[in-house]
Image (spheres, helix red, strand yellow):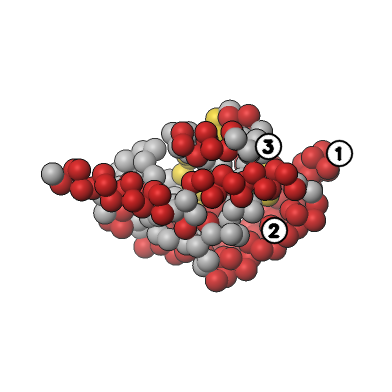
Amino acid sequence: MYLKAKRIIDIILSIIGLIVLSPLILILVIGIKLDSKGPVLFKQKRVGINKTHFNLLKFRTMRIDTPKDTPTHLLKDPDQYITRMGKFLRKTSLDELPQILNILGGTMSIVGPRPALWNQYDLIAERDRYGANDVLPGLTGWAQIKGRDELPIDVKAGLDGEYVENIGFKFDVRCFFGTFISVVKSDGVVEGGTGTQDKEEATREKENTSK
């Protein structure tokens, strides 16, 4: 029953969010257009409920010549691709605002496991162990307020599993308001990083490339 109510809550809150945040969104759109060439929105293939694929929307934070479908931490010198406006958007998580449209469209929820990239096979496999691929991915979630980019894959998947086990109105409210605290404090934000495991893999790849 709660999952049906959750969908109604998602629609109501996302409509309210679009209306309230429309002035801020307009300012960000203008800033992105003035800062660099390219579209305002960035589409990225992500994994949705039951491992179906959908296009996640973000404000563009990188140059248009950035290699596609490559996680930031695997790019060689990722800073060269991130725009000035993009650094601000990423630090404040405002690049995620267009996902309100994903929520309205039903491919995402406000709270749920963050959608994995289509080629993050290790994370997808880990989430299978906890049933975390069987719910709508979210704009924010339990793992987001527990470490975000600093979390290694197995820990992140485990936290997503905790969310699935405890899914309910009170837990969603806890995740929702916890997100604001994490964003303000920039907890767990590591530019170009997605956890200790991923950092080590990226380092090994760079070393192999230089040999």
- Percent position of residue 45, x then y: 49, 35
Mark 1 or mark 2, earlier in chain = 1
Q: Secondary structure at mark 2?
A: helix
Q: Are marks 1 and 2 in contact (CB under 8 Å)?
A: no
- Percent position of residue 106, x then y: 68, 37
Q: Quadrant of the C terminus?
A: top left
- Percent position of residue 108, x then y: 65, 41
Q: Quadrant of the N terminus?
A: top right
The residue positioned 57% from the left and 38% from the top of the image is 127
- Percent position of residue 172, x then y: 74, 53
User: Is residue 180 placed above or below 159 in the rendered structure?
Assistant: below
Residue matched to label 1: 1
Q: Which dot marks residue 93?
A: none
Q: Secondary structure at mark 1?
A: loop
The reply to whether residue 45 is in sight is no
Amino acid type, residue under disc 1 in the picture: Met
Q: Secondary structure at mark 3?
A: loop
Residue matched to label 2: 176
User: Is residue 17 placed above or below 46 in the rendered structure?
Assistant: below
Q: Nearer the viewer, residue 64 or 53?
A: 53
Residue matched to label 3: 135
The reply to whether residue 134 is in sight is yes
* C-alpha span from label 3 to label 2: 17 Å
* C-alpha span from label 1 to label 2: 20 Å
Amino acid type, residue under disc 3 in the picture: Val
Amino acid type, residue under disc 2 in the picture: Phe
Mark 1 or mark 3, earlier in chain = 1
Q: Nearer the viewer, residue 123 or 92?
A: 123
Task: Decide if residue 167 is on the left or right side of residue 130.
Answer: right
Q: Nearer the viewer, residue 203 or 179?
A: 203
